Amino acid sequence: MSQEPEVTVNDDIKPEYDFSGGVRGRYYEAYRQSSNIVILDPDVAEIFRDSASVNEALRLLAKIAKSVTV
């Protein structure tokens, strides 16, 4: 009885891809520090369907917040 886990072949990867020199997680930390992905709740995503509308709303909110606190 072998202790090695059974390996399944993933046919989605084309044979010409060569990951033999790849390093797992090589760019993970840099990506994590520079990533600015924000997940919207479904009800908010229905109203703000793209990044332009989100940015416009946040800029307006920031402008209002500045005028109230000054």
Image (tube, grey):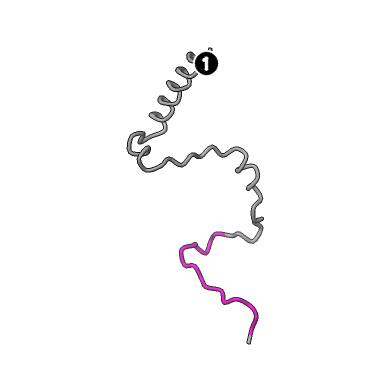
Q: Residue at x 47, y 67 (%)?
A: 11
Residue 25 sits above or below residue 48 on the image: below
Residue projecting furthest to the front:
69
Residue sitting at 43 percent across and 40 percent down?
40
Between 12 and 29, the one nearer to me in the picture: 29
Quadrant containing the N terminus is: bottom right
Residue at 66 percent of width and 50 percent of height:
26
Q: Is residue 34 magenta?
A: no
Residue 6 in percent (x, y) is at 57, 77
Label 1 sits on what residue type?
A: Thr
Q: Is residue 23 left or right of residue 13?
A: right
Q: Residue furthest left?
A: 46
State which quadrant residue 24 falls in.
bottom right
**Residue at the image point whose x is 64% and y is 52% from the top:** 25
**The residue stretch that appears in magenta:** 2-17
Q: Position of residue 68 (x, y in %)?
A: 48, 15
According to the image, label 1 marks what residue? Answer: 69
The kind of secondary structure the magenta stretch mainly shows is loop
> Is 61 rendered above or below residue 22?
above
Q: How many marks?
A: 1
Q: Regarding mark 1 in the picture, which secondary structure is present there?
A: helix
Residue reaching furthest bottom? 1
Classed neighbour count for the residue bearing mark 1: other residues with Cα under 10 Å, few (<14), some (14–19), many (≥20):
few
Q: Is residue 64 above or below residue 43?
A: above
Image coords of residue 59 (percent x, y): 45, 22
4 in magenta: yes
Residue 42 relative to residue 4: left or right: left
